Image (cartoon, grey):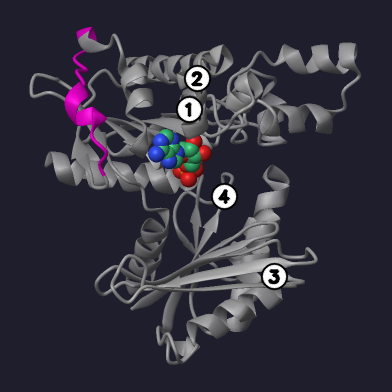
Amino acid sequence: MKALVINSGSSSLKFQLLDMDNESVLASGLVERIGDAEGNIKCTFHPDTEKESVVKKTLPIPTHTVAGQMVVDLLTDKEHGVLADKSEVGVIGHRVVHGGENFSKTTLLNDAAIAALEDTVPLAPLHNTANLDGIRIAQELFPGVPQVGVFDTAFHQTLPPHAFRYAIPKDLYEKDRIRRYGFHGTSHKYVVGECAKLCGIDVDKINAITVHLGNGGSITAVENGKSVDTSMGFTPLQGLVMGTRSGDIDPSVHAFLARNHQMSCDEIDNMLNKESGLKGLCGLNDMRDIHAAIEKGDKDAELALAVQTYRTKKYIGAYMAVLGRVDAIVFTAGIGENDDIVREMSLAGLENFGIILDTKINAQRVKTPTLLSTPESKVQIWCIPTNEELAIAREAVALVSK
Ligand code: AMP
């Protein structure tokens, strides 16, 4: 079966077409700057194979509907031959950011599910509106093809109330649904599944701490294969220090800024989401640039790395306490997969907890799942590349094949 994965953003549309008979990627691409005077579309056919070819175009792309049609035209284009006809697509999997409390698992997007999804829009107005646009357009372009929603929050719907409730007046939970939701669930679930296979443990028996460190970052405590706590909260702002997001911060800072700097809610929100994190600390949000700056003696960059890895270590310690027994710690995403220094600093000094990194193996650049701990380490340490598109396609195919 061929599966199309769609991630529709406010001005972008990411897509991947997979042949799920052998889990190969037939085409992968991105439409950007939808609605601007000039937009971009890029599609790679048969990526990472001998047949790889790339098509890039710059032209006005006024709406998501136009973007969707361009994607269909590219995928059915005779020259590249990945689809003879769009009817070959057997299922469409949509990445949906926020499922609120309505969605605890991958769901077929029928009229009732779409209505329930509309209900979650206040929780993530920008993201979920864009995701809904993507779903509606895919319904028009692929009539009759099952559309499946895979939710970033779903994996964390197993959090117990003592982990997901905030200590604020009860009404705010009951009426406004203010609670911890957690995000990156598709990635956490995928890497814990891969880790269980590699460790030879049943996925419903594994206890693990999954550390997703990319431009956004979150960490999850997984007990018997289920998420029991996670660092992101009501929104993806809470938790770890990220590229441009502050992560945990005393909530009183908001009131201080409003009173003393006359900042509006939107200005504070923007500052904490777009101007903080690593960028706020040192002016740089890409970890590669931060390492280059440290080499040149930049003290702010050095501090940014220290704050980021110290926060990650604190969460690892907290989740050791939450879980009691931990079989594995898994690093994934852009920084987690590539940055040996971040991994080493995040685990430094945890040897007494049975967490012993093999620094030589850790320093090697790896592209495939790799065990990074020494044989004596009680806790296995893994680097496992995440693959959210494959995870979404697998979930979508599994649902429609039931
Ligand atoms: P992601 O959001 O998972 O795509 O991760 C993107 C982030 O990963 C970038 O902003 C970088 O900070 C980081 N990154 C990517 N490649 C490397 C690398 N080779 N070394 C260190 N950090 C990296």
Name the quarter where the C terminus is drawn. bottom left
- Quarter of the rendering containing residue 395: bottom left
Q: Position of residue 65 (x, y in %)?
A: 69, 75
- For marks 2 and 1, give the CA distance: 7 Å
- Does the stretch in magenta take in 230? no
The amino acid type found where label 4 is placed reads Gly
Q: Amino acid type of disc 3? A: His
The image shows residue 234, relative to residue 259, as above or below, that is: below
Q: Can see residue 139?
A: no
**Which stretch did the figure color magenta?**
352-366
**Image quarter (top left, top right, bottom left or bottom right) of the N terminus:** bottom left
Is disc 2 placed on a helix, strand or loop?
loop
Of the numbered discs 3 and 4, the one sitting upstream in the chain is: 3
Mark 3, mark 4: which one is toward the viewer?
3
Q: Which residue is mark 3?
A: 64
The spot of residue 97 in percent (x, y) is 57, 50
> Could you tell me how far apart the alpha carbons at marks 3 and 2 are, in whole angstroms?
44 Å
Q: Residue at x 42, y 85 (%)?
A: 80
Measured in 3D between alpha carbons, the distance from the residue under mark 1 to the one under mark 3, in whole angstroms, is 38 Å
Q: Where does label 2 land, which residue? A: 296
Q: Amino acid at mark 2?
A: Lys
Q: Pointer 1: what residue?
A: 292
Q: Residue at x 14, y 39 (%)?
A: 199
Dot placed on the residue nearer the N-terminal end, 3 or 2: 3
1 or 4: mark nearer the eye: 1
* Pointer 1 or 3: first along the chain: 3
Do the residues under discs 2 and 1 have CB atoms within 8 angstroms? yes
Name the secondary structure under disc 1: helix
- Residue with the mark numbered 4: 99
Measure the alpha-carbon separation of dots 3 and 4: 22 Å
Q: Closer to the camera, 233 or 273?
A: 273
Q: Compare marks 4 and 2 and give the one earlier in the sequence.
A: 4
